[in-house]
Every structure is written in structure tokens, then in C-alpha cells.
Amino acid sequence: PPATPQYRPAYHFTPAAHWMNDPNGMVYVNGTYHLFFQHYPEGMVWGPMHWGHATSRDLVSWQEQPIALFPDKLGMIFSGSAVLDVNNTAGFGKNALVAIFTYHNPDEEKKGTNKHQYQGIAYSLDEGKTWTKYPGNPVLPNPGIQDFRDPKVSWNPVAKQWVMTLATKDRITFYGSPNLKTWAKLSEFGEKLGSHGGVWECPDLFPLTLGGKTYWVLLVSINPGGPNGGSATQYFVGQFDGRKFTPTTTTQKWVDWGRDNYAGVTWANTGARKIFLGWMSNWDYANQVPTSPWRSAMTTPRDLALRQVGSEIYLTSQPVPEVAKLAQPARKLTSLTVKNELSLAEKLPSPGTQFQLRMSTKQLRDFQLVFGNAQGEELVVGFDKAKNEYYIDRSKVGDNSFSPKFAGRAPGPRLATSPAADLTLLFDAASVEVFADDGLTTLTDIFFPKQPLTTLSLRAPSGLTVETLSYAQLAASAK
Ligand code: FRU
């Protein structure tokens, strides 16, 4: 297919070429953020999985590195995590980077024993440049569970051991280890809780504080079964005592309500700061999206926090402040009163295809921000007051014929209860990320316009007063 440079994002990570899915092994070491990723370096669709590698010092400009992990006789290299072994618990060396990943063995799979996925480890003594697989692999054999994968490991100071959070078909199983090499089962969670529209994948478990109290957040991606179809990531808030996760959640919660934020997890070794990154696609159509010579981008990295609304505790996601450092001087309008439709094209010249838009109002009502062009394409980000939901509608933008599951409107409920509202939108060529109410409701969608979207109008059929509306170009970061 012809190359599509117009869809190449500037501050989101994409591999130079070929297929990518989940983020893996995210770990912060000596000022460098490492991002590994599910990668098939020989094709444009999912294939035998490797761990690709990229690094960044600021979370917005990424350098792709040589491939870190190749398939071997134990299988393909599926998703997993990496830790910095500060105390040399594994004996590979002080400050060794240790990757914990799933081996997927297609030959075993054909035998139908349900034992074709098991966990292996590899280590690096040069900050991720070169890797050695542990000769004792697998470190966690499969007891006969069809889906047995995506280990996320972190040091638990209470249990004084490593804890592995593993997706095991329809639940999470926790394992503990003193040395990353021998693992013992601790507990299970979730068989009867949360969403089960699809298989559980790519979990993460980490603490966050709210009002001086510590809570544990358990992320669980599911596919299919997302709130707007296909892949999505649910989460639970609760307590973890070093062995067992006890939820306090009573309602179903989603990290992101858009169609394109999957398999997201957080960076290891960032202290109290928890930075999340997801794969900006959806298994419903990931193999068909019209980009070339690469397929898929990651989301913007997001800082996670907790917020209480009524009696519920929610996870909030905000773009990392590093993104704002790319912002060129903002163009700003204040006290706009909109009746029906207001074209902002003259007031705010087009900022191009990489930009951040902010809007605030003291009295939230129905609105549609319409990003369009002379060809009549429209990408809409809006709020529906009767349904109390934000949404992205990509049904009128681009040639969506590559998949019947792509076009459509993805709503996400407004969880904030104040009449005042604020939104931050991030655009980067072929994606929009919406952070409403300081990240309480987030929506992420990709889209593929035939021509760049250069006009903006604001529709508000029942009237709307906008306190401020500003947008700033986000410069492509120095490569
Ligand atoms: C999630 C996932 C993981 C698996 C990987 C394989 O998107 O299905 O569960 O490890 O992709 O590429």
C-alpha cells in the first residue's frame, strides 16, 4: 500500500515500520523511559511476536532501538513487564533489568493441551540494549489454563517479595517470588466481578494515595466486551495486603471509554508517580487500519490519580505535563456565547494537525466541537446533556470501509457532578484524546481523514457560554 505520512503522529510513539500492539516492559532507569512493545518486524499484521524497543527522556520524543527479544524454541514473546532488580534478588547482577514475559508456543497450542502459554524471564546488564534469556525458562509453567499470560511484576514492600499479576482467562491470579525465578500462587480475583465480555488480558496492580490513604488499583484489559465494542480496559479500586486483592468498587469502571486505548499499563520505577500508556487501537480492526508502512501508535502517556465522587473512588488520567512543553503560544478566545453554530475558522486559524485544545464553561450544556474540512468530513467531540455523556463521533470522517466495526459514535458517561466543566483535547494527525473534567472521563479514538481537518465550529443548539477556548499547536518534538 502507498505510504501514509499524513497519519504519522509526531509526539505519539509509532514504530518506523511494521506491526505493533501492546506496550510491554515499561521501566524508568537513569532518566530514560523504556518502552518495549509487541512487534512483528516482518509484516503489517499481527505475526510471530517480538519485543520491539524504544526510549525517551521526556515521554514525547521517542527513539526506536534494536529489537530486544526474539522468539525462540519456547515460543513467541507475548506481553509482560520489566523491573529494575536493585538488590540483585535474581542473581543476574545489581541493577539488572529483568523482563518477565509470556512465551506463546504455537506447536503446543496445536496439541490442545491448554499449556501453550507460560512465563519466562530475560535480563539486561546494559540498560536494555542487549538481553540474555534465562536458561531455566519457563519460570512459571502452565497448569492447564488456556489463557495464561501478560505478567506484570512489582516489588511488594509489605510481603517483601515480588508479586506477579497474571491474566488467567476469566480472572487474575497473583503469584509471589523472592527471586523472579520461582513463583508460588498467592490468590485469585475477579471470576465473579467486573466485565466478562471477553478474555482478561494485560493486568496491572499499583498503589495510589487519596487524602493520605493508600488504595490499590487493578487494571484489567478485556477483549472483546469493551463499553463501545471490542477491546477496552476496566479497573477495580481496593486493597492489596501483599497476597490478596479486595475490591471496594461497586460499579463497573473503565480507564477510557473511547475505542482506541487497550492493554495499557504503567511504568515501573517511577516512585509515587504512576504513568500509564496504552496501545491506541482495538482488536476489532487493528489489522486493517489504513496506515503504511507501520501499523498502530501508542496513546499519550498519562499521569494517573484517584478522585472521590460521592461514595465512589475513580481513577483519573491526565496527559503528562511533558506534552504541554511542546505547546506553541496559545490562541485564546474568552466569553464566547454560542447560539446554534459558531465558526471559529476566522477567529482561530487552523493549528495544523498536532494541537491541544482546551475549553471551559461554567454551565455545561449540549455542544459539538466539529473539526472539519471543505470536503465535508467531520470529526465531532461533544456532550449530550440528556444522556449526561461525552462522546467522539468519527462516522463522518475518512474512508472507513476497511472495517464495518470502525465508524461510529463512542460515548462515555460524565462522572463529574458540577455544572462547570473543562475539557482538554489532544490531536496528533490521526488520533484525538479527550480528557474531560480533569481526566475523570477520558475518550480516545483514532481516525483517518481523506484531507486534513482544518476548520472548527462549535454547535450548541440550546445555547452555551464558553469561558475560555484556546488552542495551541504542539510542535513535533526534536528527534
Ligand atoms: C493483548 C494481547 C495479550 C498478548 C498479546 C499478544 O492485546 O492479546 O494478551 O500477550 O496481545 O500479542
Image (tube, helix red, strand yellow):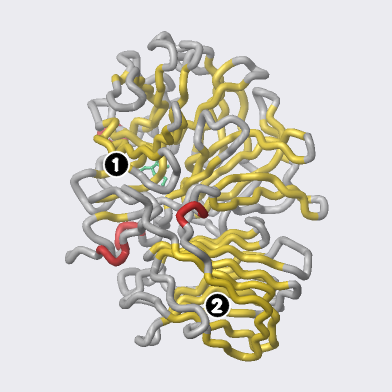
Q: Which mark is residue 64?
A: 1
In which quadrant of this rendering is ligand 1 seen? top left
Residue 383, above or below 284: below
* Residue at the image position 65 percent from the left and 23 percent from the top: 243
* Residue at the image position 28 percent from the left and 37 percent from the top: 65
Looking at the picture, tell me which residue is in the foreground, 84 or 154: 84
Q: Amino acid at mark 2?
A: Leu
Crowd tier of the residue under label 1, counting other residues whose Cα lies within 10 Å: few below 14, some 14–19, many 20 or above:
some
Q: Are marks 1 and 2 in contact (CB under 8 Å)?
A: no
Looking at the picture, tell me which residue is in the foreground, 153 or 304: 304
Crowd tier of the residue under label 2, counting other residues whose Cα lies within 10 Å: few below 14, some 14–19, many 20 or above:
many
Horizontal relation, residue 333 to residue 45: left or right: right
Q: Which residue is mark 2?
A: 369
Alpha-carbon span between mark 1 and mark 2: 35 Å
Q: Residue furthest top?
A: 91
Q: Amino acid at mark 1?
A: Glu
Q: Quadrant of residue 446?
A: bottom left
* Residue at the image position 59 percent from the left and 49 percent from the top: 234
Residue 344, above or below 223: below
